[in-house]
Amino acid sequence: MGTITYDVNIRDSRNTIIAALLDNSIVEYKVGLSDVRVLQSAFIGLAKLLEEHASYTGILVIDDARISKTRLFEEWKSWSKLFQPSILSRIRMVVFLHGSIIQKNGGFSSDETEALYTIQNQLWKKSKNNKRKRSDSLIEIFRVLLVHWFRGSGPLQITQISQQTGFSFPTVAGALEKLESHLKRNSDRSVELITFPRVYWFKLTAAMDDVRVPQGYWARNPRSINDLIDRINENADRDIAFGGIIGASNYFPGIDLVGIHRIDLCVHNWSLSKIDKFTRKLDPGLKKVESGELPQVVLHNLSRPESFFTRSNNIPTADEVECLLDLYEARMESQADELLEHFIGRIGK
């Protein structure tokens, strides 16, 4: 694998900073594309760089685009006809979906392909962290407050909330101001929820796909659910826990659940490669789901500093909020509502 450097300043007429440099290949990275115009602009920008740097090749990395694979290929063909031969021979495009390459245009060696997986993983994590910093910090802070409220943990200092969420003291203080009507502030400057903020709960459930970024897997001939559960328990460490139906039944044995049609797992600060390695070990037949496929195993990656995992019936269990969100995500709304009312009803008992 070649030498990789990130955030490289390319000496050109615009003093451009590129996402990564792989030996003599300029790597531009676009994640979550939904507008073809942005893709077209990326093609033009990369071509201009190659015009000024005749010794370089260019690789456009498209990650988790909301543009179809067919449309991406059509755009590649259209722009290929417009490039001069001196540019066309040095420009390539690779498309990732959920950490796997689903399309390559242009010639790639096996070493370059291996390096691109490393680059994608690094840049995806960076974009996710940046997105989290830009996202509604109030929702993330609310999630942590809600876990403590469900558990009856008592008041928290702002510094504790900051440490557990990963947000700065001023950011936490600002979020608490918005939640003021649902909070109790104590003389030692600690705070705690005293009522359930349903408006913010609805905001969280509406934004959960963007907040949680689920990774779904399925197999044509899957292992049985019980076999998968046993294998997970055998290989479980403190960074993985059951959510969804299994987690919900641990918190509320009386919940109205019929069978287990999928396994929800919560992992704490795992890389995409670690997630893929774990699923392959769990069942070599598991593949990442594509559009229209129902997942049999779903992993959610927590990026905050504190996981709040527990053990119930000797089974590692994700926090109450994660289990609720898993049920909503699985379209088990009535069971999720039942579990939510169970958590709210036990407050103060």
Image (cartoon, grey):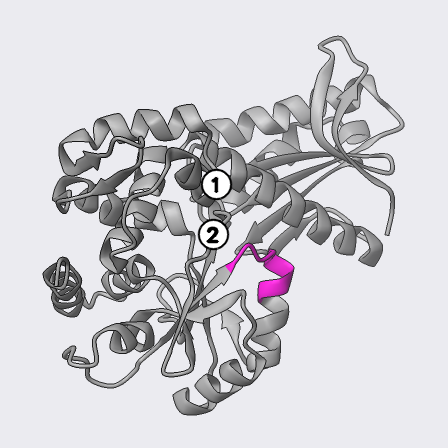
Q: Residue at x 53, y 72 (%)?
A: 287
Residue 191 bears which disc, if any? none
Bounds of the magenta segment = 268-275
In the rendered structure, are the residues bearing label 1 and label 2 in contact, judged by CB atoms less than 8 Å apart? Answer: yes
SS at circle 2: loop
Three-letter code, disc 2: Glu
| Residue 36 versus residue 96 in the image, above or below | above
Q: From the viewer's perspective, is 169 left or right of 58?
A: left
Q: Which mark is residue 306?
A: 2
Residue 344 location (% of width, % of height):
13, 58
Amino acid carrying label 1: it is Gln
Residue 83 at x, y percent in the picture? 69, 28
What is the number of the mark on residue 163? 1
Q: Position of residue 262 (x, y in %)?
A: 35, 77
- Measure the alpha-carbon separation of dots 1 and 2: 8 Å
Q: Nearer the viewer, residue 70 or 85?
A: 70
Asked if residue 210 lies in the magenta stretch, the reply is: no
Work out which residue is located at the far top of the displayed protein and give it: 13
Residue at image position (47%, 52%) is: 306
